[in-house]
Image (tube, rainbow, N blue to C red):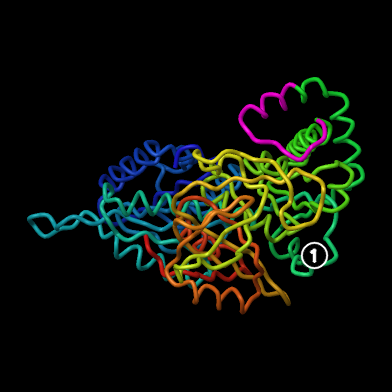
Amino acid sequence: MAGTQLKLGFCPIGKFVFSHEDALHYKALIEAKLNQWGVNYVSIDGVLPDGIVRDQSHVEAVVDHFKRADVDAIFMPHCNFGTEGAVGMIGAKLGVPVLLWGPRDEAPLPDGRRLRDTLCGMFASSKVLHKLNVPFTYIENCRIDDPAFEQGVDGFLRAANVAGALRRGVRIGHIGQRIDFFWTTIVNESELLEKFHVEVLPLDMVEFIRRAKDRAHKHRTAYEAELTALKQSAEIVGFDGDGPMINVLAARDEMLELGAKHNLEGFAIQDFNSLVDEMDAYCFFADSAVADCYAIGYESDIHGALSGVLLHRATLNTAPTYLVDLTVRHPTNDNGILLWHAGAPLSMRDPDDRLKIGHHWILPSPLSGMTHFRLQQGPITVARFDGDHGVYQLAVGQGRSMDGPYTQNNYVWMEVDDWPHWERTIMQGPFIHHTGMIYGHYADALIEACKFVPGLAPLRLDKPMD
């Protein structure tokens, strides 16, 4: 959990009944766990006596405090019972993802008294949250040191981070325009903005090429030195001179500058043909380098770039994503599928496979610049944000890498639980052949995130394995 910039509102809940001393004890234990896990949180210490909500009159002060702190989500652990009206009003007024949990109650004291009725209080609070249409994540009533608590907090933070992209807003830079024969990537930009706060920033292709070429000319000496070093670690073929690859390196740096300048989380790129012709090269090595920092939607796939953003956020912004094609089934394993494309993040390369930059093996072009390397092994999550006719879904599934035949460009074979089921589900729409992928299993967090995004329905492709 450490490292996330998501800001969590820590709002312990008590009540005027039961032991206030025991509530304070558990508040301290829970806060110690948050500190241990490196969670970025804001407490209500100094806002309320003892930093615990115990009455409905506390609502306005707490809401005002968390709004000024601009929290992304709120955690309301029940420390001895629950002030259910306050829980519901705080959740409704803040309008951010809510986490509900309380520590498992101990046995009654020898005289029959109980210091806490945490579970009972949460039943009451959950009813009020339902009544006020406040979506929430619930962690089972467990002990503070049980794995379920840490796993639940971790999953919630990931879900809230994913949901934040579509609740608070995200920007995707679109270099060029949609390629005419890619009808599958036609999207409704107005709906994306209105429903999900997704802003598509047009970036003029002519201006991009001009600036990249100017950069290549101005910094040619430095790029020549970088290219010389790259040739020692990679196989680069198909070029008559260094000029085209220098253009590619400059395109990489132009994309990185645009991303930082415009606060982007992803790019959608036209890719060909004008960019290729003007640069005298396919620019997929530039995409591979940039993809370690930003989600990339090849072939102007804006929904694809957004899928990558959501996957990246599910890792708490720590791992790169890759937009792959679902291409061919495994020749001998009925549950195997080839995840393939070009421009994969360089960090995804299998350490035993050498980077090659060469020709496009499908299109009959004399130009070079396509990336070729096998991807690493490991657990995989795929996700596709898509929609038609105003109805949007997030399809999510998990699998694992598997052995499979060699092919060109960037690829990994993935085994899933029931590929025929996946195939039928994806085919029936509203999805296409592009899907985001990432290493690790994050499906639960992505599915949970949809709970906090009005208008986005989750679709689980696999039966949960973890």
> Taking 404 as reference, is 32 left or right?
left
Frontmost residue, 133 versus 311 = 311
Q: Is residue 94 visible?
A: no
> Taking 348 as reference, is 431 left or right?
right
**Quadrant of the frame with the C terminus:** bottom left
Identify the residue shown where x is 79% and y is 69%. 183
Frontmost residue, 466 versus 337 = 337
Q: Is residue 76 visible?
A: yes
Q: Mark 1 = which residue?
A: 190
Looking at the image, which residue sits at the far left?
110
Residue 229 magenta: yes
Q: Is residue 23 above or below residue 246?
A: below
Q: Quadrant of residue 105?
A: bottom left
The secondary element bearing badge 1 is classed as: helix
> Taking 163 as reference, is 12 left or right?
left
Residue 15 magenta: no
Residue 17 in percent (x, y) is at: 29, 57
Q: Which residues are magenta?
A: 225-241
